[in-house]
Amino acid sequence: MSHPDTAARLPAPPPLSDDCALFLDVDGCLLEFADDPSSVRADSALLASLEAASRRLGGALALVSGRSVASLDRIFAPSLFAAAGLHGLERREAAQAVVVAERPAPEPALWADVVADAQAGLAGYPGARVEDKGRTLALHWRAAPAAEVDARDFVARALARLPGYGVQPGNQVLELRPDGADKGAAIAAFLRAPPFAGRRPVFAGDDLTDEHGFALVNARAGISIVVGDRRPTQACHGLADPAALRRWLGHSPHLQSEASA
């Protein structure tokens, strides 16, 4: 189901219930976008809300992000949550468990050449960034809009050099990543095992990369939440921005009482 209307026209999500499994995107969803992703940190209030939610849900809370799991751990330290990174290419079943690579890494020399070519191609655009995540490569032009054309041209050329790769568009970013892994598949994998199995899935996200997750959650009779005004979307509920999502998380009747205890 697609909703082309404004954020205000989508109903707000209901409060979390104890039988939910909660999946949360990070950038643009839990946290505002930043020109420098390496500078992002979760504040103590957000960590308290997430910890309270995880306890209430028996540990059935996972971060599902385009970032690596290592990057997520840095942002949310000292807390440690179950997580899917790189759009589902790596996944940690539960806190303190081993990170599993869902797809093999590309040949190192080829990957190094692709990264170097991307950096050279965007070198003339101050503010544009090439983010090497090891198995995915993101080209950002949020702070350098003029770089978009060259970024798109580079990605089109790079796909011919990377068999089995596709392009994932996002908010002022294009990301090269292996085919066959997405946030919907990551959520489905979590739902096959405790503490997530048998629970009603809830997923909040803001970007095109989150649509696979919305589709999976809708198919499981769950709750899909788009954060922001991006349309069309398969999400059935909407919240205006990350601040609204954080209020929703903190204002859930059960979780609010525990977080403030």
Image (cartoon, grey):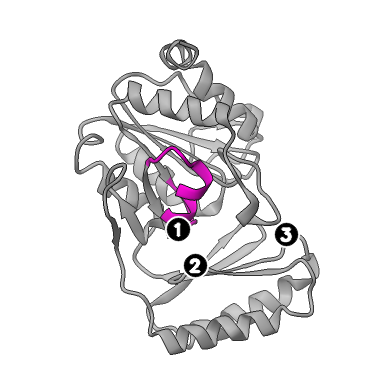
Residue 95 in the image, given as x and y percentages of width and height: 31, 42
Residue in view at x 19 percent, y 42 percent: 193
Packing grade of label 1 (10 A; few <14, some 14-19, many >=20) is: many
Residue type of the residue flagged with mark 1: Ser
Q: Which residue of the protein is positioned furthest toward the front in this rendering?
A: 78
Q: Disc 3 marks which residue?
A: 142
Q: Is residue 163 above or below residue 88?
A: below
Q: Earlier in the sequence, mark 1 or mark 3?
A: 1
Residue type of the residue flagged with mark 2: Lys
Cβ–Cβ under 8 Å for marks 1 and 2: yes
Instruction: Indicate the secondary structure of the residue bearing disc 2.
Output: loop
Q: Is residue 130 above or below residue 90?
A: below
Cβ–Cβ under 8 Å for marks 2 and 3: no
Residue 155 in the image, given as x and y percentages of width and height: 58, 78
Q: Disc 2 marks which residue?
A: 133
Q: Is residue 228 magenta?
A: no
